[in-house]
Image (cartoon, rainbow, N blue to C red):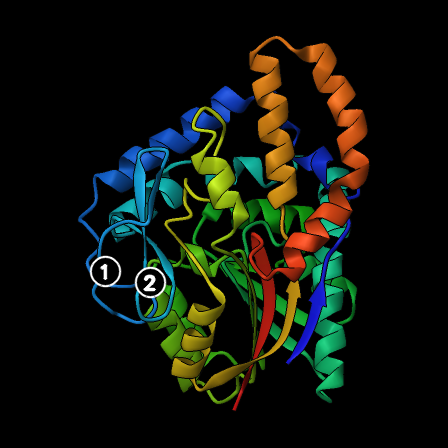
Amino acid sequence: MEKKYGKSFGKLNSFKTNFFEDNDGMLKMADEMADIFASQPKRKVCKICGTPLLRPLFVSHRLGYIQCPECGHLNGEYEDTDEFASKVYVEDDYSRNYSEDTREKYQNRMNLIYIPKAEYLKTCLEKEGVKDINILDIGAGCGYFVTAARTLGMKAHGIEVSKNEVDHGNRMAGEEILVHVGLKDSIEYIKNTDANTISAIGVLEHLIHLKENLEAVRENDNIRYLYASVPMFSFSCAFEASHQDCYNRHCGGTHTHLFTNSSIERMASDMGFEVAYEWRFGSDINDLYRFIMVSLAKNKNEDFAAYFSQKFTPLMDDLQLILDKSEFSSELHFILKRR
């Protein structure tokens, strides 16, 4: 397995200013999603391996999180059901925090966030000797990754359950790169694709029928690789659990479960795949920085907040790299290949 660690925050905070400036509004949104989640049936078995679950390891923002005793996956205490998915992904405007309203802003977001992801995939598959990369991007959102992949010369298209996002993405791209599908239609789409690579950027944690989608990947011999980024059980979970009045972007909202190294290995094994490449770059330090800044502002310590920011921000990349190398940071990009 080839491993890579770290990525500079650079200008990424420019896309998350509302996390700082509208903490209360973002927290209210997360609390509303938590209310929907808490109205679902209790989760009895692990999302990844089906092992019966025991008591919660911790509680954050009113929700319990249970670590699977078998594969280590972190499961929210309630089921993510079709009803939950319909309410948060289709009925609510979930995309409002992840889409840009002008072509220039769309292009900027794509260049800054998604081009590096697409470059990583292309570099790794070229090492594998893959010359014709053909990508099906599932949960494609507004098409940022599809656009990035096509910009780099790869063949790519995407499927997405939100018609608003599909229409917006196709309009921003200037061509039909996305297809609208129903909540369960992605399974058949995956079974019948001729793509050799599935990409799922920030998607696996949102799939209600995760096992069925992964089984469809396993059954389609055309698919040789799965490229995904997922939220991980990490330091951010502790930072959020200890800052209950700050917006919980990581362990909450639509993140009803979090991956671990061992649960990813179990998932890959069940699919007949193996982990070939990993790239770890989390946002734990950014989360900690945000919580401190929000708390200082709430306590009317604006002058000290500015002084602290001046001292702390130059250290953030180095601090995050330490956490990334510990392999307990908040985000992992990985590529699975068929055995």
Q: Position of residue 330 (x, y in %)?
A: 56, 52
Name the quarter where the N terminus is drawn.
bottom right
Side (left or right) of 313 relative to 217? right
Q: Residue at x 52, y 83 (%)?
A: 274
Q: Amino acid at mark 2?
A: Lys
- 238 to 300, vertically: above or below: below
Residue underneath mark 2 = 184
| Residue 218 in view (yes/no) | yes
Side (left or right) of 258 relative to 326? left
- 22 to 32, vertically: above or below: above
| Residue 102 in view (yes/no) | no
Q: Position of residue 67 (x, y in %)?
A: 34, 58
Q: CA distance from mark 1 to mark 2?
A: 26 Å
| Quadrant assignment, res 148 | bottom right
| Quadrant assignment, res 90 | top left
Q: Which structural element holds mark 1?
A: loop
Q: Amino acid at mark 1?
A: Leu
Q: Which structural element holds mark 2?
A: loop
Q: Position of residue 194 (x, y in %)?
A: 54, 82
Q: Nearer the viewer, residue 46 or 309?
A: 309
| Quadrant assignment, res 109 | top right
Residue underneath mark 1 = 53
In front: label 1 or label 2: 1
Side (left or right) of 107 relative to 237? right
